Image (cartoon, rainbow, N blue to C red):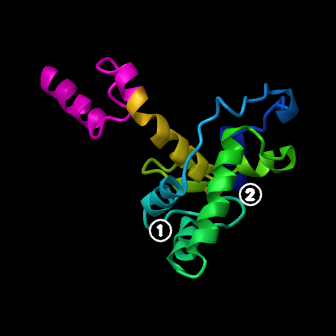
Amino acid sequence: PDVVEQMRRKHPRSRQAVDPASLPAVHAAAALQVDGDAVRREVRAFPRGSAAGPTGLRPQHLKDALLNAAHRDEVTDQLRNLVNLCARGQAPPAVSEYFAGASLVALPKKDGGLRPVAVGEVLRRLVGKCLCHEVADAARDRLAPLQIGAAVPGGTEAAVHVVRQRWT
């Protein structure tokens, strides 16, 4: 009970929920669309042992489904359709609390406190990974050289090293 209370204090419930119907519609022509290759690539890119979200679906479940040659094309098509549906903002409002939700895990800190770690739903994470990959080059071109944390492999690590060198 003490851990649950600490987590509630760190993550209070939203005072005002956003009604998905109140959000502006995304014009289908403006929405990014991904192909099956992108979906398979991003599923494979989930780190080994990635945690499940609130529904219990794990990235490994998707990886295993894509390994089955008899169903690979169908699984790919269904995941691609889901990613593109979400990219257009057309996911049913009834699933929004599950897609936007997360499982909260309390990890102990060295000082004795608790660190809340939220693990989002795997399908929403897949949508985000696919869309981020689609805009990575444009983001890097737009933001560099002032912002090196977007689509610059090792960019933030390099920044830390430069800062350390300047102040030591």
Circle 1 Cα neighbour tier, 10 Å, few/some/many (<14 / 14–19 / ≥20)? few
Work out whether 13 lies above or below 41: above
Can you identify the residue that label 1 sits on?
Answer: 49
Task: Out of 73 and 133, give the one closest to the viewer.
Answer: 73
Q: Residue at x 54, y 72 (%)?
A: 66
Which residue type does callout 1 highlight?
Gly
Q: How many marks?
A: 2
Work out whether 9 lies above or below 164: below
C-alpha distance separating marks 2 and 1: 28 Å
54 to the left or right of 24: left
Which residue type does callout 2 highlight?
Pro
**Residue 12 occupies quadrant:** top right
- x, y percentage for residue 88? 70, 38
- x, y percentage for residue 70? 58, 82
Circle 2 Cα neighbour tier, 10 Å, few/some/many (<14 / 14–19 / ≥20)? few
130 to the left or right of 164: right
Q: Is residue 103 visible?
A: no
Can you identify the residue that label 2 sits on?
Answer: 1
Q: Residue at x 48, y 39 (%)?
A: 134
- Residue 155 falls inside the magenta stretch: yes
Q: Which residues are magenta?
A: 139-168
- Residue 72 falls inside the magenta stretch: no
What is the quadrant of the N terminus in the image? bottom right
Q: Are marks 2 and 1 in contact (CB under 8 Å)?
A: no
Question: Residue placed farthest to the top in the image?
Answer: 146
Work out whether 97 lies above or below 139: below
SS at mark 1? loop
Q: Is residue 123 visible?
A: yes
- x, y percentage for residue 75? 62, 68
Q: Residue at x 50, y 50 (%)?
A: 112
